[in-house]
Image (tube, rainbow, N blue to C red):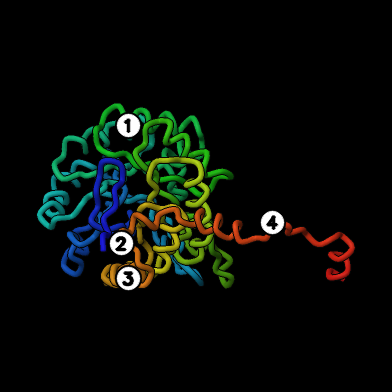
Amino acid sequence: MDLSVRIGSLTLKNPLIAASGCFGYGVEYADIVDLSTLGAVVSKGLFLEAREGHAAPRIVETPAGLLNAIGLQGIGVRRFVDEKLPELRARGAVVIVNVCGTTLDEYVEVSRILSGAEGVAAIELNISCPNIKEGGIQFGCSLNGTFDLVCAVRKVTALPVFPKLTPNVTDVASFARAAEDAGADAVSLVNTFLAMAIDVETRRPKISNVFGGLSGPAIRPIAVRMVHECRQTVKIPILGMGGIADARDALEFMIAGADAVQVGTASFVDPFIWSKLTDGIRDYMRRHNVARISDLVGTLESLKSEVRSQIAPDFRLPTSDFLLQICV
Protein backbone atom coordinates (compact mmCIF):
# COMPACT_ATOMS: atom_id res chain seq x y z
CA MET A 1 0.00 0.00 0.00
CA ASP A 2 1.31 3.41 -1.01
CA LEU A 3 0.74 6.09 1.65
CA SER A 4 2.84 8.76 -0.09
CA VAL A 5 1.24 12.05 -1.09
CA ARG A 6 2.42 14.93 -3.25
CA ILE A 7 1.89 18.53 -2.14
CA GLY A 8 3.10 20.77 -4.94
CA SER A 9 6.76 19.89 -5.46
CA LEU A 10 6.95 18.25 -2.04
CA THR A 11 6.50 14.47 -1.68
CA LEU A 12 5.59 13.16 1.79
CA LYS A 13 5.94 9.51 2.80
CA ASN A 14 2.45 9.61 4.32
CA PRO A 15 -0.36 12.16 4.74
CA LEU A 16 0.06 12.65 8.52
CA ILE A 17 1.48 16.02 9.57
CA ALA A 18 2.01 17.38 13.08
CA ALA A 19 0.13 20.68 13.20
CA SER A 20 1.65 23.98 14.21
CA GLY A 21 1.17 25.09 17.80
CA CYS A 22 0.59 21.62 19.22
CA PHE A 23 3.96 20.01 18.55
CA GLY A 24 6.33 22.68 19.77
CA TYR A 25 9.25 23.00 17.38
CA GLY A 26 9.20 19.24 16.86
CA VAL A 27 12.31 18.56 18.93
CA GLU A 28 10.24 18.43 22.13
CA TYR A 29 8.61 15.20 20.93
CA ALA A 30 11.73 13.70 19.37
CA ASP A 31 12.43 11.25 22.22
CA ILE A 32 8.97 9.66 22.06
CA VAL A 33 8.05 10.06 18.38
CA ASP A 34 10.27 9.06 15.48
CA LEU A 35 9.95 12.29 13.52
CA SER A 36 11.16 10.61 10.35
CA THR A 37 8.03 8.42 10.30
CA LEU A 38 5.69 11.44 10.02
CA GLY A 39 4.72 12.99 6.73
CA ALA A 40 5.99 16.31 8.09
CA VAL A 41 6.26 18.47 11.19
CA VAL A 42 4.96 22.07 11.23
CA SER A 43 6.82 24.32 13.65
CA LYS A 44 5.33 26.77 16.10
CA GLY A 45 4.61 30.12 14.53
CA LEU A 46 7.74 32.22 14.01
CA PHE A 47 8.04 35.99 13.82
CA LEU A 48 11.22 37.85 12.92
CA GLU A 49 12.00 38.40 16.61
CA ALA A 50 11.10 36.54 19.80
CA ARG A 51 7.57 37.03 21.12
CA GLU A 52 6.24 36.71 24.67
CA GLY A 53 2.66 35.78 23.90
CA HIS A 54 -0.29 36.36 26.22
CA ALA A 55 -0.33 36.18 29.99
CA ALA A 56 -1.68 33.09 31.75
CA PRO A 57 -4.22 31.60 31.93
CA ARG A 58 -4.22 30.96 28.19
CA ILE A 59 -5.47 27.39 27.73
CA VAL A 60 -8.75 25.87 28.92
CA GLU A 61 -10.41 22.57 28.08
CA THR A 62 -13.90 22.58 26.61
CA PRO A 63 -16.42 19.71 26.48
CA ALA A 64 -15.16 18.64 23.05
CA GLY A 65 -11.87 20.39 22.51
CA LEU A 66 -9.47 23.05 23.63
CA LEU A 67 -9.61 26.85 23.80
CA ASN A 68 -6.28 28.62 23.60
CA ALA A 69 -4.92 32.14 23.41
CA ILE A 70 -1.17 31.53 23.53
CA GLY A 71 -0.59 34.65 21.49
CA LEU A 72 1.99 33.04 19.19
CA GLN A 73 4.78 32.99 21.74
CA GLY A 74 8.02 32.03 20.02
CA ILE A 75 11.80 32.26 19.87
CA GLY A 76 12.04 34.10 16.54
CA VAL A 77 13.16 32.79 13.18
CA ARG A 78 16.93 33.19 13.62
CA ARG A 79 17.08 31.21 16.87
CA PHE A 80 14.91 28.53 15.26
CA VAL A 81 17.32 28.22 12.35
CA ASP A 82 20.37 28.12 14.66
CA GLU A 83 19.03 26.02 17.55
CA LYS A 84 16.10 23.84 16.43
CA LEU A 85 16.53 23.19 12.72
CA PRO A 86 19.84 21.28 13.01
CA GLU A 87 18.32 18.72 15.38
CA LEU A 88 15.19 18.35 13.26
CA ARG A 89 17.42 17.77 10.26
CA ALA A 90 19.44 15.17 12.18
CA ARG A 91 16.24 13.39 13.19
CA GLY A 92 15.14 13.07 9.56
CA ALA A 93 12.07 15.30 9.93
CA VAL A 94 10.39 16.95 6.97
CA VAL A 95 10.07 20.49 8.31
CA ILE A 96 7.35 22.94 7.36
CA VAL A 97 7.79 26.29 9.10
CA ASN A 98 4.78 28.30 10.20
CA VAL A 99 5.55 31.94 9.37
CA CYS A 100 3.91 34.87 11.14
CA GLY A 101 4.13 38.63 10.86
CA THR A 102 2.59 41.91 11.93
CA THR A 103 3.32 43.46 8.54
CA LEU A 104 3.69 42.22 4.99
CA ASP A 105 7.38 43.09 5.10
CA GLU A 106 7.89 40.90 8.17
CA TYR A 107 6.31 37.88 6.46
CA VAL A 108 8.58 38.47 3.48
CA GLU A 109 11.74 38.80 5.57
CA VAL A 110 11.03 35.68 7.69
CA SER A 111 10.32 33.71 4.51
CA ARG A 112 13.53 35.01 2.92
CA ILE A 113 15.60 33.88 5.91
CA LEU A 114 14.03 30.43 5.87
CA SER A 115 14.64 30.08 2.15
CA GLY A 116 18.37 30.10 2.80
CA ALA A 117 18.21 27.62 5.69
CA GLU A 118 19.10 23.99 5.06
CA GLY A 119 16.34 21.58 6.02
CA VAL A 120 13.23 23.71 5.49
CA ALA A 121 10.85 21.86 3.16
CA ALA A 122 8.01 24.40 2.92
CA ILE A 123 6.50 27.56 4.38
CA GLU A 124 3.06 27.72 5.96
CA LEU A 125 1.84 31.32 6.08
CA ASN A 126 -0.13 31.91 9.25
CA ILE A 127 -2.71 34.48 8.20
CA SER A 128 -5.44 33.12 10.45
CA CYS A 129 -4.55 33.15 14.16
CA PRO A 130 -7.73 34.45 15.86
CA ASN A 131 -6.19 35.55 19.16
CA ILE A 132 -3.79 38.32 18.18
CA LYS A 133 -5.08 41.71 17.03
CA GLU A 134 -2.28 42.74 14.70
CA GLY A 135 -0.92 41.21 11.53
CA GLY A 136 -1.95 37.80 10.22
CA ILE A 137 -5.68 37.73 10.76
CA GLN A 138 -6.01 41.14 9.06
CA PHE A 139 -4.50 39.64 5.91
CA GLY A 140 -6.50 36.42 6.30
CA CYS A 141 -9.88 38.17 6.48
CA SER A 142 -9.27 40.25 3.35
CA LEU A 143 -9.25 38.74 -0.13
CA ASN A 144 -6.90 41.45 -1.37
CA GLY A 145 -4.74 41.05 1.73
CA THR A 146 -4.46 37.30 1.21
CA PHE A 147 -3.61 37.73 -2.46
CA ASP A 148 -1.02 40.47 -1.86
CA LEU A 149 0.71 38.62 0.97
CA VAL A 150 1.01 35.34 -0.92
CA CYS A 151 2.28 37.22 -3.99
CA ALA A 152 4.92 39.03 -1.95
CA VAL A 153 6.21 35.85 -0.29
CA ARG A 154 6.11 33.95 -3.56
CA LYS A 155 8.59 36.44 -5.03
CA VAL A 156 11.28 35.80 -2.40
CA THR A 157 11.21 32.02 -2.06
CA ALA A 158 11.37 28.92 -4.20
CA LEU A 159 10.02 26.84 -1.31
CA PRO A 160 6.42 25.58 -1.50
CA VAL A 161 4.07 28.14 0.08
CA PHE A 162 0.95 27.06 1.98
CA PRO A 163 -1.28 29.86 3.35
CA LYS A 164 -3.16 28.71 6.46
CA LEU A 165 -6.70 29.99 6.08
CA THR A 166 -9.09 31.19 8.74
CA PRO A 167 -12.54 29.63 9.15
CA ASN A 168 -13.81 32.91 10.61
CA VAL A 169 -15.06 34.20 7.25
CA THR A 170 -18.32 33.69 5.38
CA ASP A 171 -16.83 32.06 2.27
CA VAL A 172 -13.53 30.28 2.89
CA ALA A 173 -13.44 28.92 -0.68
CA SER A 174 -13.03 32.43 -2.09
CA PHE A 175 -9.92 32.89 0.07
CA ALA A 176 -8.55 29.57 -1.16
CA ARG A 177 -9.07 30.82 -4.71
CA ALA A 178 -7.30 34.10 -3.94
CA ALA A 179 -4.35 32.16 -2.53
CA GLU A 180 -4.25 29.91 -5.60
CA ASP A 181 -4.38 32.90 -7.95
CA ALA A 182 -1.47 34.48 -6.05
CA GLY A 183 0.74 31.44 -6.58
CA ALA A 184 0.21 29.31 -3.47
CA ASP A 185 1.28 25.67 -3.87
CA ALA A 186 -1.41 24.45 -1.44
CA VAL A 187 -3.69 25.76 1.30
CA SER A 188 -3.92 24.66 4.92
CA LEU A 189 -7.37 24.74 6.49
CA VAL A 190 -8.71 25.34 8.91
CA ASN A 191 -7.23 27.26 11.79
CA THR A 192 -9.13 27.56 15.07
CA PHE A 193 -12.56 29.14 15.50
CA LEU A 194 -12.89 32.33 17.54
CA ALA A 195 -14.55 31.42 20.85
CA MET A 196 -14.66 32.18 24.57
CA ALA A 197 -15.32 30.51 27.92
CA ILE A 198 -16.57 32.08 31.17
CA ASP A 199 -16.13 31.05 34.80
CA VAL A 200 -19.67 31.49 36.11
CA GLU A 201 -18.53 31.66 39.75
CA THR A 202 -16.25 34.64 39.21
CA ARG A 203 -18.04 35.90 36.06
CA ARG A 204 -14.67 36.35 34.44
CA PRO A 205 -13.26 34.97 31.20
CA LYS A 206 -11.35 31.72 31.69
CA ILE A 207 -8.43 32.99 29.61
CA SER A 208 -6.66 36.31 29.99
CA ASN A 209 -7.18 37.34 26.37
CA VAL A 210 -10.98 36.88 26.77
CA PHE A 211 -11.24 35.34 23.30
CA GLY A 212 -9.28 32.39 21.99
CA GLY A 213 -9.14 29.76 19.28
CA LEU A 214 -11.30 26.64 19.60
CA SER A 215 -9.83 23.37 18.34
CA GLY A 216 -10.63 19.69 18.81
CA PRO A 217 -13.48 17.35 17.81
CA ALA A 218 -16.13 20.07 18.20
CA ILE A 219 -14.96 21.82 15.04
CA ARG A 220 -14.39 18.77 12.85
CA PRO A 221 -17.72 18.65 10.96
CA ILE A 222 -17.40 22.34 10.06
CA ALA A 223 -13.78 21.91 8.99
CA VAL A 224 -14.68 18.91 6.81
CA ARG A 225 -17.38 20.97 5.12
CA MET A 226 -14.93 23.79 4.44
CA VAL A 227 -12.36 21.40 2.98
CA HIS A 228 -15.03 20.00 0.66
CA GLU A 229 -16.09 23.49 -0.43
CA CYS A 230 -12.51 24.46 -1.22
CA ARG A 231 -11.94 21.22 -3.12
CA GLN A 232 -14.76 22.26 -5.46
CA THR A 233 -13.12 25.64 -6.02
CA VAL A 234 -9.34 25.17 -6.29
CA LYS A 235 -7.04 22.71 -8.02
CA ILE A 236 -4.05 23.06 -5.70
CA PRO A 237 -3.59 20.54 -2.84
CA ILE A 238 -5.35 20.99 0.48
CA LEU A 239 -3.95 20.22 3.93
CA GLY A 240 -7.01 19.54 6.06
CA MET A 241 -7.22 19.80 9.83
CA GLY A 242 -9.62 20.33 12.68
CA GLY A 243 -10.42 17.82 15.41
CA ILE A 244 -8.78 14.71 13.94
CA ALA A 245 -8.57 12.13 16.72
CA ASP A 246 -8.42 8.79 14.91
CA ALA A 247 -7.90 7.26 11.48
CA ARG A 248 -11.55 7.56 10.49
CA ASP A 249 -11.39 11.32 11.09
CA ALA A 250 -8.31 11.62 8.89
CA LEU A 251 -9.96 9.55 6.16
CA GLU A 252 -13.07 11.72 6.34
CA PHE A 253 -11.00 14.79 5.52
CA MET A 254 -9.29 13.05 2.64
CA ILE A 255 -12.54 11.77 1.14
CA ALA A 256 -13.85 15.35 1.41
CA GLY A 257 -10.86 16.57 -0.61
CA ALA A 258 -7.77 16.95 1.60
CA ASP A 259 -4.53 15.62 0.10
CA ALA A 260 -2.96 15.39 3.55
CA VAL A 261 -4.04 16.10 7.11
CA GLN A 262 -2.62 17.86 10.13
CA VAL A 263 -3.20 16.61 13.66
CA GLY A 264 -2.97 19.01 16.58
CA THR A 265 -5.03 18.87 19.76
CA ALA A 266 -5.22 15.05 19.78
CA SER A 267 -1.43 14.85 20.09
CA PHE A 268 -1.76 16.50 23.52
CA VAL A 269 -4.15 13.76 24.62
CA ASP A 270 -2.08 10.96 23.10
CA PRO A 271 1.51 11.68 22.02
CA PHE A 272 1.65 8.16 20.56
CA ILE A 273 -1.31 8.72 18.24
CA TRP A 274 0.79 8.66 15.06
CA SER A 275 1.31 4.90 14.76
CA LYS A 276 -2.35 4.35 15.57
CA LEU A 277 -3.38 6.68 12.77
CA THR A 278 -1.05 4.96 10.31
CA ASP A 279 -2.27 1.49 11.31
CA GLY A 280 -5.89 2.60 11.03
CA ILE A 281 -5.38 4.06 7.56
CA ARG A 282 -3.59 0.92 6.37
CA ASP A 283 -6.39 -1.25 7.74
CA TYR A 284 -8.97 0.85 5.88
CA MET A 285 -7.00 0.64 2.65
CA ARG A 286 -6.74 -3.11 3.02
CA ARG A 287 -10.47 -3.56 3.66
CA HIS A 288 -11.46 -1.30 0.77
CA ASN A 289 -8.81 -2.46 -1.70
CA VAL A 290 -7.23 0.99 -1.96
CA ALA A 291 -3.70 0.64 -3.32
CA ARG A 292 -2.70 4.32 -3.06
CA ILE A 293 -3.99 6.71 -0.41
CA SER A 294 -3.95 9.53 -2.96
CA ASP A 295 -6.66 7.67 -4.91
CA LEU A 296 -9.03 8.33 -2.00
CA VAL A 297 -8.73 12.13 -2.13
CA GLY A 298 -11.95 13.90 -3.12
CA THR A 299 -13.90 10.70 -3.76
CA LEU A 300 -17.00 12.10 -2.11
CA GLU A 301 -18.06 13.56 -5.46
CA SER A 302 -17.99 10.19 -7.22
CA LEU A 303 -20.14 8.76 -4.46
CA LYS A 304 -22.70 11.55 -4.92
CA SER A 305 -22.76 10.89 -8.66
CA GLU A 306 -23.32 7.20 -8.03
CA VAL A 307 -26.25 7.95 -5.74
CA ARG A 308 -27.79 10.25 -8.35
CA SER A 309 -27.51 7.58 -11.04
CA GLN A 310 -29.47 5.16 -8.87
CA ILE A 311 -32.49 7.46 -8.69
CA ALA A 312 -35.23 6.32 -11.06
CA PRO A 313 -35.59 8.67 -14.07
CA ASP A 314 -39.32 9.01 -13.47
CA PHE A 315 -38.81 10.06 -9.83
CA ARG A 316 -41.09 12.90 -8.79
CA LEU A 317 -41.34 14.83 -5.55
CA PRO A 318 -44.56 14.27 -3.54
CA THR A 319 -47.38 16.67 -4.30
CA SER A 320 -47.92 19.63 -2.04
CA ASP A 321 -51.17 18.09 -0.70
CA PHE A 322 -49.30 14.95 0.35
CA LEU A 323 -46.59 17.04 2.02
CA LEU A 324 -49.22 18.95 3.93
CA GLN A 325 -50.79 15.71 5.14
CA ILE A 326 -47.56 14.18 6.41
CA CYS A 327 -46.44 17.45 8.04
CA VAL A 328 -49.73 17.63 9.96
Residue bearing the label numbered 2: 291
Q: Residues within 10 Å of mark 3 (few under 14, many from 20)?
A: few
Which secondary structure, mark 2?
A: loop
- Counting from the top left corner in percent of width and height, residue 205 is at 53, 62
Q: Is residue 290 left or right of residue 78?
A: right
Q: Is residue 276 left or right of residue 324?
A: left
Does residue 164 appear in this view? yes
Query: Which numbered dot is residue 153?
Result: 1
Q: Amino acid at mark 1?
A: Val
User: CA separation, marks 3 and 2?
Assistant: 8 Å
**Residue 63 sits above or below residue 252 on the image:** below
Which circle's residue, 1 or 2, is located before the other in the chain? 1
Please, what is the three-letter code of the amino acid marked with disc 2?
A: Ala
Label 1 with label 3: CB-CB less than 8 Å: no
State the residue in front, 296 or 14: 296
Q: Where is mark 3, residue-wise?
A: 286
Residue at the left extreme of this rendering: 90
Tag nearer the camera, 2 or 4:
4
